[in-house]
Image (tube, rainbow, N blue to C red):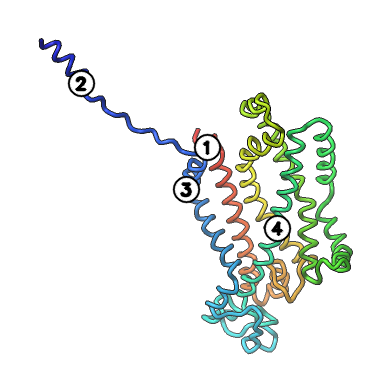
Amino acid sequence: MSLNSAANSEVDAPVSASPAIAGRSPRQIAWSRFKRNKVGMVAAGISIFLLSASLFAPVVCKLLGINPFDLNLDGLDTSGIPRGKYAGFSLDHPLGLIPGTGRDLLAQLLYGSRISFMIAIVTTFTSLTIGFFVGIVGGYFRGRVDGYLGRLTDFLLAFPAFFMIVALSEPMVGRIEQAGIAQGNGARIVFLIIFLSFFGWPGFSRLIRSQVLSLREREFVTAAQAMGASRRRIIMKELVPNLWAPVIVVVSLSLPGYLAAEAVFSFLGLGVQPPASTWGILLSNATRFVTVMPSFFLITSASLVIVVLAFNLVGDALRDALDPRADK
């Protein structure tokens, strides 16, 4: 009797429920990895703040009571240098005045960043679009198509892009103006976007092609082919969704590169021209006053360094977060 009751009690005893295993999507896993990267989180916050300040530059300037077009000549001495002990720094002008013109430096940086960010963003996505298409076509179809596209990519990568842009800047800007596409600085912006994209897409193409060559041999692609799926469906439903991780990383790392490229060409006088403002133009002006007013050069160069470094750190953090081997 005691044995039966003991057996019955063991059978009737409630089995302790095992803790539920909560499944997480790849997006949630990547986000949890990204949050653990404190440097990446700080860099992402700085990047978002700088992008927002650039996008809403008119609103920010209005709130701060500064204007990028006002000539505060009363704040300059007879040699064009800001008066006072602190190079024009004040509550009215938080980063001081620009020598020679008396314009507010903070307002100029905010408005100049709009042009720099616009060129960098448009160039990045133009290069990505072309490279994405060429890389998928070459990687999936392979054979002769891949051979032709590969030779074209190698040909463009062999070009000295910097010297080509320098040599063709003035004649191509003139052609753009004659065609009525844009005039003045608009034509120079179009030129930079076209040529930076033209020489930038081969790098994207090679990355996408290598990813597609790996993905097309996976089981899910083979299964889709066995089920009679069309090439278009395989590309759009099986390949493209698995390419977003490397694309996001490349975009985050390419954007600061194009920001720096725009600054270099504007610094050399090949990009946007005054009275418009970009980081390159401000740096070019700052070099003329580096001995008499070093703060102008230091603030301008530091702003560019901070932006480029922040985006690079975000790209590194995204690369680590999207790496499936990160937790191993």
Residue 226, image x and y in percent?
66, 24
Tell me whether circle 2 and circle 4 mark residues in contact (CB < 8 Å): no
Real-space CA distance between mark 3 and mark 2, rounded to the nearest whole angstrom: 46 Å
Q: Earlier in the sequence, mark 4 or mark 3?
A: 3
Real-space CA distance between mark 3 and mark 1, rounded to the nearest whole angstrom: 13 Å
The image shows a total of numbered marks equal to 4
Residue 149, image x and y in percent?
82, 39
Q: Is residue 82 above or below residue 2?
A: below
Q: Amino acid at mark 2?
A: Asp
Real-space CA distance between mark 2 and mark 4, rounded to the nearest whole angstrom: 68 Å
In the picture provided, is 13 more to the left or to the right than 146? left
- Foreground label between 4 and 3: 4
- Foreground label between 2 and 4: 2
Q: Amino acid at mark 1?
A: Ala
Residue position marked by numbered label 2 in the rendering: 12
In the picture provided, is 154 more to the left or to the right than 230? right
Q: Residue at x 58, y 43 (%)?
A: 319
Residue 11, image x and y in percent?
22, 18
Residue position marked by numbered label 1 in the rendering: 326
- Disc 1, SS: loop
Q: Amino acid at mark 4?
A: Val
Residue position marked by numbered label 4 in the rendering: 122
Q: Earlier in the sequence, mark 3 or mark 1?
A: 3
Q: Earlier in the sequence, mark 2 or mark 4?
A: 2
Residue 186, image x and y in percent?
77, 68
